[in-house]
Amino acid sequence: MELSVLALQAVNIALWAVDKAAGGALEKAGTDVLDFLTNRFQGKLQIRESERKLLEAAILSQAEWDNKFQEDLERLVNNYQQLQNTTVSQNTQSGVNLNVNNNNSGTVIGQQNIGQQQQFFR
């Protein structure tokens, strides 16, 4: 991943994690990025929206001379993006909550039964 893209993605994820309550795989992955950056820049800068450009510049600077930092951060960012792209949540009209990971076919087992059950309750 290009270094500037990596830095921008890491900043976006870290700032998103600051605003979210912990819970679920995506939030955990965001918290992992935030924790990684917080530990790396502890005492040097604070991770908050008003420091976005400063944080991005710090990540770029750190990654240019520390390949291990770049590799670790890239692994965390890629993990977050993978989870973000594969998690689907849906609340149906019947109040059934569906959480599906890697839904390639577009159909959830039992989904057809939900429509049939709605007919009985109407």
Image: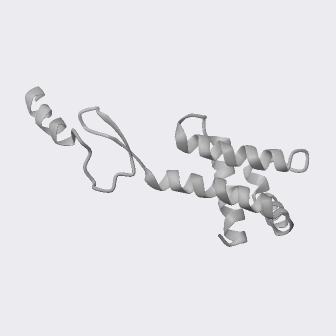
The residue shown at (72%, 61%) is 71
Quarter of the N terminus within the rendering: bottom right
| Residue 47 showing in the rendered view | no
Quarter of the C terminus within the rendering: top left
Question: Where's residue 121, x and y in %?
Answer: 12, 27
**Towards the viewer: 41 or 52:** 41
Task: Using the image, determine if residue 82 lies above or below residue 5.
Answer: above
Task: Using the image, determine if residue 109 lies above or below residue 104.
Answer: above
Residue at the extreme bottom of the image, as rendered:
2
**Towards the viewer: 21 or 72:** 72
Q: What colour scheme has been applied to the protein in the rendered image?
A: one colour
Horizontally, residue 37 falls left or right of residue 98, namely: right
| Residue 115 showing in the rendered view | yes
Horizontally, residue 49 falls left or right of residue 95, namely: right
- State the image quarter where residue 119 is shown: top left
Question: Where's residue 7, x and y in %?
Answer: 72, 63
Task: Using the image, determine if residue 81 lies above or below residue 98.
Answer: below
Residue at the extreme right of the image, as rendered:
43
Question: Where's residue 105, x and y in %?
Answer: 28, 55
